Amino acid sequence: MIRIVLADDHAIVREGLRQLMMTTADIQVVGEAGNFVELQHLCQRTAFDVLLLDMTMPGLSGIELIQRLVAEMPSLPILVLSMHIERQIVTQALKVGASGYVAKGSLPETLFVAIRKLADGAKYIDPLLVNDLVFDASDSDEPGARLSLRELQVLGMIAAGRSLGDIADRFHLSPKTISSHKIRLMQKLNIDNNADLIRYATQHMPFEI
């Protein structure tokens, strides 16, 4: 039996996933969490094989959430189940330690296959996402594909309306350093003013990573 934990801040989504898993003979939900703190406590007291994770939860979320989980539980297979399928987000999630990524719009069978693959020690990428990921970022027409993880994080926080001072506090860096990241990402995006940067950020960064 494959034991999984569901981490999603929407109770209705978790209940739907629990009911979905009940249609299988080999997958069992052994715990649920709606935020990072609940997930931490659950991981400390529950034995399980795969974490099914929505990155957009209250508090710690996104790429930083995966990094923290990997640091605390290096051998934990993390399967991201998300509505966000932008190339840069999927790529960074995998780079920092997620073992798999499935779009929420995929068929249940895709999710079952992913869970079983991760439980066997393999990795898995949703077929819906593969075409976008097989091309090297340097060949992409999307400027955001050339941004570093920190630049993507800064861009995501700009999209959320955070000031440079807020961003600096979040990452324990100086405002000058954050300003440098902002300048570099604007250069990579060929953007030369704040209005266009905010417009790009809100269109391409659906949440803070």
Image (tube, helix red, strand yellow):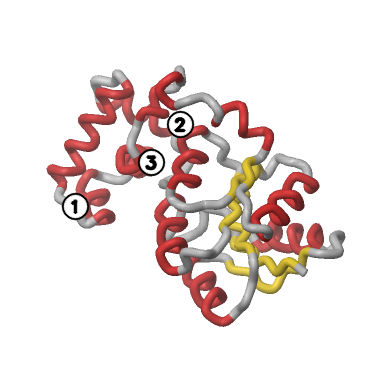
Check contact, mark 1 vs mark 2: CB within 8 A.
no
Q: Which residue is farthest bottom?
A: 45
Q: For mark 3, what is the residue?
A: 156
Q: Residue at x 48, y 46 (%)?
A: 93
In the image: residue 159, left or right of residue 167? right
* 151 and 11: which is toward the camera: 151
How crowded pointer 3 is (Cα within 10 Å; few <14, some 14-19, many 20+) is rated as many
Report x, y in % for residue 69: 46, 63
Q: Residue at x 81, y 64 (%)?
A: 26
Q: Is residue 45 above or below residue 83?
A: below
In the image: residue 207, left or right of residue 112? left
Nearer the observer, disc 3 or disc 1?
A: 1
Q: For mark 2, what is the residue?
A: 204
For marks 3 and 1 on the same chain, the one whose residue lies earlier in the sequence: 3
Q: Splitting the image into 4 quarters, where does residue 105 fall?
A: top right
For marks 1 and 2 on the same chain, the one whose residue lies earlier in the sequence: 1
Q: Secondary structure at mark 2?
A: helix
Query: What's the residue type where badge 1 is placed?
Result: Leu
Residue 90 marker = none
Q: CA distance from mark 1 to mark 2?
A: 24 Å
Report x, y in % for residue 140: 46, 20
Q: Residue at x 20, y 43 (%)?
A: 178
Q: Splitting the image into 4 quarters, where does residue 133 fall?
A: top right
In the image: residue 13, left or right of residue 203? right
Nearer the observer, disc 1 or disc 2?
A: 1
Report x, y in % for residue 202: 42, 33
Q: For mark 1, what is the residue?
A: 173
Query: What's the residue type where badge 2 is placed?
Result: His
Q: CA distance from mark 3 to mark 1?
A: 16 Å
Q: Is residue 192 above or below residue 164?
A: above
Residue 161 in sight from this viewpoint = no
Q: Secondary structure at mark 3?
A: helix
